[in-house]
Image (cartoon, grey):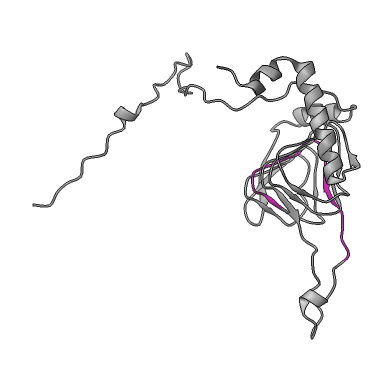
Amino acid sequence: MESVRTLIRRHRWLYHALRRGAMALKRWRYGLKRVHPTCFIAGKSTISSDLVAGEFAFIGPDCTIGPGVRIGPYSMLASRVAIVGGDHRFDFPGVPMIFSGRPDLRPTIIEADVWIGYGAIILAGVSIGRGSIVAAGALVTRDVAPYEIHGGVRARKIGERFAELADRMRHDEMLSQPPKMGEECGPKTLSLAFDERDQGAKPLPIPSASDRQEPETEHSP
């Protein structure tokens, strides 16, 4: 039997009307006056009221977003992403850090069409270039160039989003246009496993619980 959410998704006008209403209430609750109406905030998060977020941005549940953050159109923050830092001065000899005040806060810029993976930590003051990807669990302490993929602790470049310059230029052209609605991702579902070596793409059997037998162990005499 289909869930209520699935049934609502079948009627796009109803789904988007309910979604806009829910987001208007959430923006009011968080005091977010500079977040675009098409930005979607899932679940509960800790968000500074000065957040700026563009068209079709997405913020997953359990995120922590400190002050001075700008999120560009189409960008996605997965669950438990934290944008933090710049909390205390620590360079005053003879003064406890708790009484040392705060350093000047630099803005944190997340440009358009960025994907930040689950549990990533972004230190305040960095810039993450358009079209880039930050892997799950990464600790980002310095700027990320456009279209690069960064991961690790500390995060470093581990790849490029597009292998061909022509693809990057084509994507830049799209991002230079006014943001517009596209087809959203539905819920993740389990699909059949396929053997990539088989050009016929025959499905591989998925073992059942009865097929999973414990390996025999040798017994010493």
Measured from the top left, where is residue 200 in percent x and y?
A: 47, 13
- The one nearer the camera, 215 or 154, is 215
- Which residue is rendered at x = 65% and y = 21% of the image? 4
- Which residue is rendered at x = 86% and y = 49% of the image? 49
In the image as oriented, which residue stretches furthest toward the bottom? 94
- Which residue is rendered at x = 80% and y = 82% of the image? 95
Specify whether residue 28 is in view: yes
Measured from the top left, where is residue 40 in percent x and y?
A: 78, 34
Measured from the top left, where is residue 173 in percent x and y?
A: 85, 27
Residue span colored magenta: 104-121
User: Toward which corner of the image does residue 217 lie, by quadrant?
Assistant: top left
Specify whether residue 169 is in view: no
Q: Could you tell me which quadrant the N terminus lies in?
A: top right
The answer to whether 142 appears left or right of 67 in the picture is left
In the image as oriented, which residue stretches furthest toward the left? 221
Residue 63 sits inside the magenta stretch: no
The answer to whether 211 appears left or right of 42 in the picture is left
- The one nearer the camera, 21 or 216, is 21
- The one nearer the camera, 174 or 100, is 100
Name the chief secondary structure element in magenta: loop
User: Toward which corner of the image does residue 208 lie, by quadrant?
Assistant: top left
124 is higher (above) or lower (below) than 185: below
- The one nearer the camera, 183 or 169, is 183
Residue 116 sits inside the magenta stretch: yes
